[in-house]
Image: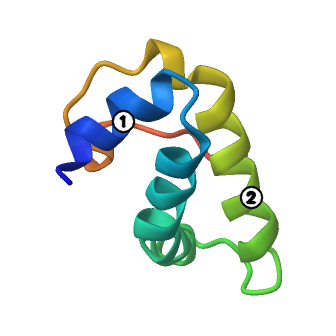
Amino acid sequence: MPVKELIAKAQSEDLESYSLLIQLHHRTVEKFTFQCGVHVHDIPDVTQEVFIKLDRFLHQFNHERFTTCYIKLP
């Protein structure tokens, strides 16, 4: 299933699609936080915060892919 379709389904509160999006992008978020200088012990917490923010603002998301958006790290 294309990511754009997963995003649309997740926006419609399809928990399975949202879970799949997390699975698909979890490692990318971890790598990005490390590259931004987040301490290795804080990476799981920061990654969790990213996905919590994603959940809160997913209804506003209008890009085709997550890698096209900007996520401000805490």
- Label 2 to label 1, Cα distance in Å? 18 Å
Q: Is residue 25 left or right of residue 47?
A: left
Asked if residue 63 can be seen in this view, the reply is yes
Provide residue 60's location: percent of width, then percent of height.
46, 13
- In the rendering, which numbered label is found on residue 48? 2
Colour pattern:
rainbow
Which residue is more in the foreground, 53 or 31? 53
Provide residue 39's location: percent of width, then percent of height.
74, 79
Provide residue 16's location: percent of width, then percent of height.
55, 50
Residue sitting at x 39%, y 37%? 70
Residue reaching furthest to the top? 60
Q: Is residue 30 left or right of residue 9?
A: right
Residue sitting at x 49%, y 40%? 71
Asked if residue 68 can be seen in this view, the reply is no
Residue sitting at x 53%, y 46%? 18
Say if 66 sits above or below 28 in the image: above
**Secondary structure state at the residue bearing disc 2:** helix
Query: Image quarter for residue 37?
Result: bottom right
**Mark 1 nearby-residue class (10 Å; few <14, some 14–19, many ≥20):** many
- In the rendering, which numbered label is found on residue 56? none
Say if 53 sits above or below 46 in the image: above
Q: Is residue 13 left or right of residue 11?
A: right
- Residue type, label 2: Gln
Q: Which residue is mark 1?
A: 7
- Residue type, label 1: Ile
**Secondary structure state at the residue bearing disc 1:** helix
Q: Is residue 26 left or right of residue 47?
A: left
**Mark 2 nearby-residue class (10 Å; few <14, some 14–19, many ≥20):** some
Total numbered labels: 2
Provide residue 74's location: percent of width, then percent of height.
73, 45
Which residue is more in the foreground, 50 or 32? 50
